[in-house]
Image (cartoon, rainbow, N blue to C red):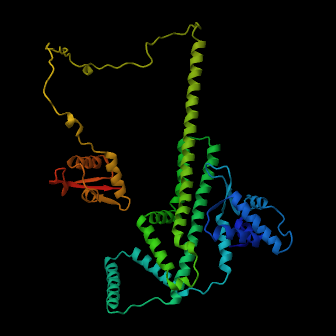
Amino acid sequence: MDYDSLKTLKRIHPGWRLLTADNAPMIVSFLYRCFIEPNVRTLQETDLVSSLDDYLYRLNETHEAAAYPKSASEYLNDWSADERAWLRKYYPRDSDEPHYDLTPATENAIRWLAGLQQPHFIGAESRLMTIIDLLRQIMQGTETDPEVRIFELERRKSAIESEIQDIRDGKMSFMGETPLRERFFQVADTARELLADFRQVEQNFRDLDRQVREKVTAWDGSKGEMLEDFFGERDAITDTDQGHSFRAFWDFLMSPARQEELSQLLERVMALESIQTLSPDKRLTRVHYDWLEAGEVAQRTVARLSEQLRRYLDDKALLENRRIMNLLREIEQHALSIRDVITDAPEMEIDELAPNIELPMERTLFSPPIKPRIDQQQLSVGDDDIDAQVLFEQIYVDRNKLEMRIRQALQMREQISLTDLVNEYPLQLGLAELVAYLSLAADDDHAVIDDTVEQSIQWTDSAGDRRRAFLPLVIFSR
């Protein structure tokens, strides 16, 4: 934070330029209204131009006349220019209309201005409890002495049992109005800050995407060097603390059970009478879906990186093949040009371009051909009355249907045994269907067949009789 670095930061940082802009109140209020307040990621140019036209008209009517003389399109182009970089203007795939999104620097500046407003009260208790909980997690996660960990778990167990006993005795303690409001405001602020973090992660991958495109355009080295440089820069982002935290957060959020738990908690909290008096933002009940949408945008940016790299490899392979064909044509043309030239240099002829190696032991022994013996008999027409319906009563097991059952069962869990799977989807074709399940497990690399553990499976055949089969333990996994 020295003088020179701050002076440079004031000149190049988009957020600082926004705070010192002449039209900063108009710009910040409009961007906050369109992007931050409704938790919107991107907007089409037509929608944003229409909103800005209406906003400028109201400002010019209620404030100084012609205070903002430019058109909405001119303002948007000005804000998205490189010298300001308050908005990101881009063209999505399969769209010829530009879209706009906030840059991370702009969002941080707007949220900083929003934080300058005096809050309802300072949540000192909730912040202190958060600090204490974080310190406890650090100590519990780094403790190497087993006895200390067991002692801490026993202490927590005793406290939980004591609280359970108090509830059974009718002694229930409830959170007061002030602590409840503190924690709710902290939850709301943290939920909105997460969206800003997603924009920053996406911006990091977008910067890497731009660097890769620039290097691909001017790269003249080998493909191996290009791949090493690309994966090195990608690992530099994904292997940082921010990258590890983002992956852990994304894996946690992608769990269907966690999504259901978040939805239930948000609905129950928003339904509390004390929270209703605060007039909370209704969009908070689906903020986790906004997180998912923001995370998908970051994941699509990573997918574009992979697509750009694949296209580069395909282009390099095409150029190399073209170079090889040019060399072969040059050799052929040179051979034709000297074909009739007579020289005094010693000559030598070869039969083929490569020798044919034939080993004596590779030759098989002589085997006389088998002469088939055909008995000439007169065929007679049969007169037995045979029921041909049995030809159409064969059992066919649809393996695709069984695979679909396995995938549906693994959507809500990490693994499932064959016994539990058969309990959810009873056998309809008997032993043939059970053998098909075993065949799928043998072909699946993620499935486990444990011969040391035996399990039994029961089913009812078409005649109504109970059947049972004993087989090794089979577990299907994701």
Q: Is residue 17 visible?
A: yes
Q: Is residue 413 above or below residue 222?
A: below
Q: Of 311 and 235, which appears nearest the observer?
A: 311
Q: Of 472 and 380, which appears nearest the observer?
A: 380
User: Residue 298's x, y, as percent?
Assistant: 56, 58
Among the 4 quarters of the image, the one containing residue 104: bottom right
Among the 4 quarters of the image, the one containing residue 137: bottom left
**Left of 436 or right of it: where is 219?**
right
* Label tally: 0
**Residue furthest out toward the right:** 65
Q: Is residue 222 above or below residue 61?
A: above
Q: Of 265 and 462, which appears nearest the observer?
A: 462
**Image point (53%, 77%), residue name:** 187
Q: Quadrant of the N terminus?
A: bottom right
**Image point (68%, 80%), residue name:** 116
**Image point (13%, 27%), residue name:** 384
**Left of 231 or right of it: where is 2?**
right
User: Residue 279's x, y, as percent?
Assistant: 58, 81
User: Residue 281's x, y, as percent?
Assistant: 58, 76
**Left of 232 or right of it: where is 30?**
right
**Image point (49%, 84%), residue name:** 129
User: Residue 471's x, y, as percent?
Assistant: 18, 53
**Left of 252 or right of it: where is 303?**
right
Q: Is residue 127 visible?
A: no
Q: Quadrant of the C terminus?
A: bottom left
Q: Of 469 and 341, which appears nearest the observer?
A: 469
